[in-house]
Image (cartoon, rainbow, N blue to C red):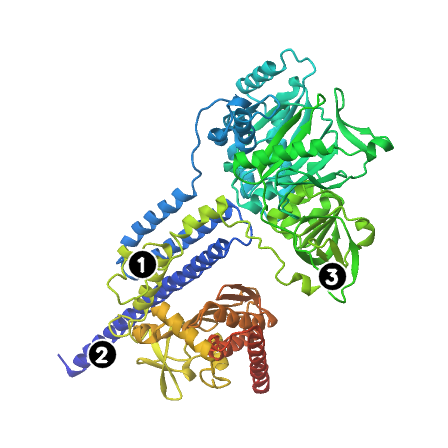
Amino acid sequence: MSIFRAFGSLFQKDRVAGEEELRREEAVRAAFKARCARFKALLSANKRALGAMAGLEEAMRGERFFSLTFVRAGCTTVLTNVYNMVRSLNELCDNAYAPLVERIQEIGAAITADLEPKGHAESGPLVLPLEEAGFALSHEVGGKMASLGEARRNLSQDIPDGFVITAAGFRRFIEANNLQEEIARRGQLIDPSNLQEVFELSDSLQKLLESAPVPADLAAAINEYAGRITAGRPEARFAVRSSAIGEDAQGASFAGQYRTELNVAPEHLVGTFRTIAAGKYSVTAMTYRFNRGIPDHEVPMCVGCLLMIDALSGGVAYSRDPLGDPRSVLINAVPGLPKSVVDGTGEVDVYRVSREVPHTVTERSIGRRASRLACDRVEGIVEVPLSEQEAATPSLTDEQALEVARLTLGLESFYGTPQDVEWAYAPDGRLLLLQSRALPGADLGAHLHEPPEGAEQLAEGGVCAAPGAGSGKVFFLRRNADMLRFPSGSVLVVEQAHARWAPVLGRAAAVVAGAGGAAGHLAGVAREYGVPALFALPGALDILKEGMEITVDADARRVFAGRVEELLQGNAMPRRLFAGSPVHTVLAKVVQHIVPLNLLYPDAPTFAPAYCRTLHDITRFCHEKAVEEMFRLDENIFSGRCGKQLKYKGAKLQYFVVNLENGFCQTVDGRYVDIDQICSLPMRALWNGMIAIPWSGPPSASARGFLSVMAESAANPELEITNASTRMLRNYFMIDRHYCNLQASFGYHFCTVEAQTGESEQENYVSFHFKGGAANLARRKLRVQAVADVLAENGFIVDVREDTLSARAEEQPADEALDLLRIIGFLLVHTRQMDAALHREDSRVSFADQLRKGIAEILKMDRETA
């Protein structure tokens, strides 16, 4: 072979070797790009999973209502994203963590079991006579009829004859018409907090039930029992009343939320049953269930049918006055039917009777009214005008008031708890028991005091229907449609204290009504919700003007102009309506499979799939192992191409940079990258914010702040830096030209920053997640709130939950997005360990002002260098 051919062969080999090396390099780059994409997918799924967990944790506090649909959706979101994390991790690690899939399936099965509605008896009588109803059958006849049936069997008190259409009867009606699936489907499509959507759902569901035929066997059973009672009583009519499961329960009375139809002819009972059943989906009933966390499937609508009494007088009695002297029985009475007492539409007579023997009438107040309610065979219920003498005549004699008091106290003794009793006097003079239920708020009491000095009093008088004080702007409700516009925090003002206004109570600061009494349904619900209520206030609708700010002192029965802070301090009742509710109970069960974190130490032998007991454990495991996999600098095949350690002014920092694509200005060899070699615009902006103003070091904390840090560190060993692995001290950037993702820890708190700052304004965003600290929760919350305040002022949409902050700005021009990153960079550095120094509201305000000054300086520096 000639020397030329030898050299040619050598050059050919070199060329082939170069091409082979280039192909290998391209393959490595492609694999690296795919690897980084999986890591980005894992981080994204992690963020969504933790966000959903935070939402479930917030709901656990029970301060707002949510539906079972919300719980299911939250669980589904967490499960889906945790599964995506596991899939991405196994793709990164060649399926090294396949057992995690089995763990997800096991945890998911446990969550599903807790979410599934509990079964009910498949069979049972469709109708039961009242004398067979009792507490043992409350799951089939409802609390209202169970209580009445128990009293009928065990007490000598007169109670009208009647029967109950049972839960089995209601289920027969629903199942015969295949309604349950459609009801559930429509219910899942609405936001329970949107009253307009609730109104629309209510209308559609009530129409659905009212148009459904009652199955023949149920109709026959109803007619058979009605025939037994009306035999020999040709004039007999019925009072048809709801007795839903859970109605009249302790702490959830459903007062006035369901329907009652009076003076119903026997031949109309089947159709009236359908009307009462449809009333389960009235706006008031559905809103009440939403507010109290009661799932629809747990409330089958039992219906009580009692002989109608054309009462001479009737009303409601409380065995203990919940708003005045608890040593008294409180009686509200009217001539005729007691309907106007419970629905809050009539002037009532009020009697107080001492509980001690011998009982005496200690107080009486006789109302003035123009008519009474009575039965009419043709019209049903009619108003009968009263003469002047009749209008001034008390509804009860003192002897009758004492008889009502003895009945009420006897029922309290029988049931073992204070009672709310509905009663009536029959035309033959007999005292009849119509209903008895536990009295909500029997341990409450009005707190009388002198008017605050300097406060302008607008009105005085009326009846304290629910204790406390509240302040807000006046909003009049005159029509149902007005409820759709009711602003949260306003004072609800109505002419009559009717139960139909209950859907807005959860948003009201207080209630004022021109008519109504403390025994009405709206009063009862207001006490349950903890909303101060003042009823029967003389001239209320003339004195108060739409939009004026007032303070309602229901205890002292006064209304003041403006906001009177002295009355509001410590006077608000808690509104933890959800705590202990059925939906809250379900949530409490499922979060035990989701939220607790048991994997605390990455270097421990228990940091393994077999020890993942919750979905949070799995997220922690996946994130830790993914970081470990991506940033193993020594043995990873992508060493030198994956994570490069950041250098700044010659110093090697605990920041590692992953170049996804075009994040470096040039090819960077070796294990280190200088900040000047990085051309990722968002990373440079973030870094410039971090270094713009030097950090002055840890703040000077008080002794209490220092002890708080020590206590938190002792309670949470994960915060102890000396126990951490080397990886925990590292901070990671993932970058390209217009994208940056930072995972970092700064003095015990942890953060994620993510940003896209390209040419398309619609695609740009800046996202910031901040959590933790070493001080106690109260101090951490002060720091987070200070950060939240300044971020909100700079255009971020901010969400704060406990010591966790999430902030996001979207659709930003690139230069504005980069400014936001400079702000975040400054905050990352200058919030370090500040939780130890914050202990009061004034310190939070001062800290926020310091942050504002620093941000202004940074933005000014940026403009000067531009």
Q: Horizontal placement of 659 versus 241: left or right?
A: left
Find residue 295 and report its horizontal and vertical position in percent: 51, 41
Q: From where the camera sits, is residue 245 visible?
A: no
533 up-or-down from 338: above or below: below
Find residue 277 and report its horizontal and vertical position in percent: 59, 30
Q: Earlier in the sequence, mark 3 or mark 2?
A: 2
Between marks 3 and 1, how big is the CA–CA gap? 71 Å
Identify the residue at the far top of this view: 232
Q: Nearer the viewer, residue 637 or 9?
A: 637
Between marks 3 and 2, how big is the CA–CA gap? 103 Å
Q: Kindly report which numbered mark, 2 or 1, lies closer to the viewer in this rendering.
A: 1
Residue receiving disc 2: 11
Rendered image quadrant of residue 474: bottom right
Residue 685 is marked as none
Say whether marks 3 and 1 touch (CB < 8 Å): no
Secondary structure of residue under mark 3: loop
Q: Residues within 10 Å of mark 1 (few under 14, many from 20)?
A: some
